[in-house]
Image: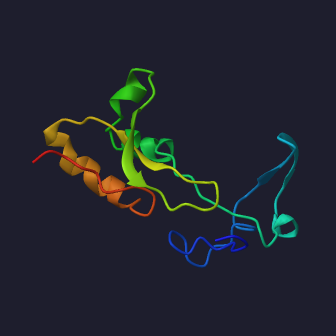
Amino acid sequence: DAGVPTPSRVAPGADLRTDIPQYRVYVNGKMDREVEDATSLWTDDTVGFLLGCSFSWEGELAAAGLCPRHVEEGKNVSMYKTNIPNVASGRFKGFLVVSMRPYLPKDVDKVRPLLLLLASQILSPTAPA
């Protein structure tokens, strides 16, 4: 919602103006400066949004001996645009994008608990029955 700095659906109690270590301020499409507190920049029509990225938890998999294949091969992860709409906010809208990491069936039960620890950031891992 415009003007609301709390992402209540994914991080109740968080404040997008102050809870991120550093903010980049863009003016006319160019980075102008970096600040540690964006409270003075936040207005009633500011819309904040969070972008999740699967790259942030690939290190967890690798540390557990389950390095994703695309990392080992030096490639990007496979991504797919779904037909599931994201919650729109003004002109910001689109569809959910999911990523896929293939694992052998014998490794799925090792991968699942690691990813479920990050359940607020990702959907549950899916494996064929």
Where is residue 5? Give x, y as percent: 69, 72
Residue in view at x 37 percent, y 61 percent: 117
Left or right, 94 with respect to 128, comes to right
Residue furthest front in the image:
91
The answer to which quarter of the image holds residue 102 is top left
The answer to which quarter of the image holds residue 78 is top left
Where is residue 120? Give x, y as percent: 44, 64
Residue in view at x 52 percent, y 51 percent: 52
Where is residue 6? Give x, y as percent: 64, 74
Quadrant where the image shows the N terminus: bottom right
Residue furthest top in the image:
73
The answer to which quarter of the image holds residue 122 is bottom left
Left or right, 120 with respect to 44, comes to left
Residue 124 to residue 60: above or below? below
Where is residue 70? Give x, y as percent: 38, 27
Residue furthest bottom in the image:
13
Residue in view at x 55 percent, y 60 percent: 88
Residue 78 to residue 15: above or below? above
Residue furthest left in the image:
129
In-front residue for pair 90/27: 90
Residue 38 to residue 4: above or below? above
Left or right, 110 with respect to 58, comes to left
In-front residue for pair 5/75: 5
Left or right, 50 with respect to 104, comes to right
Residue in view at x 41 percent, y 32 percent: 77
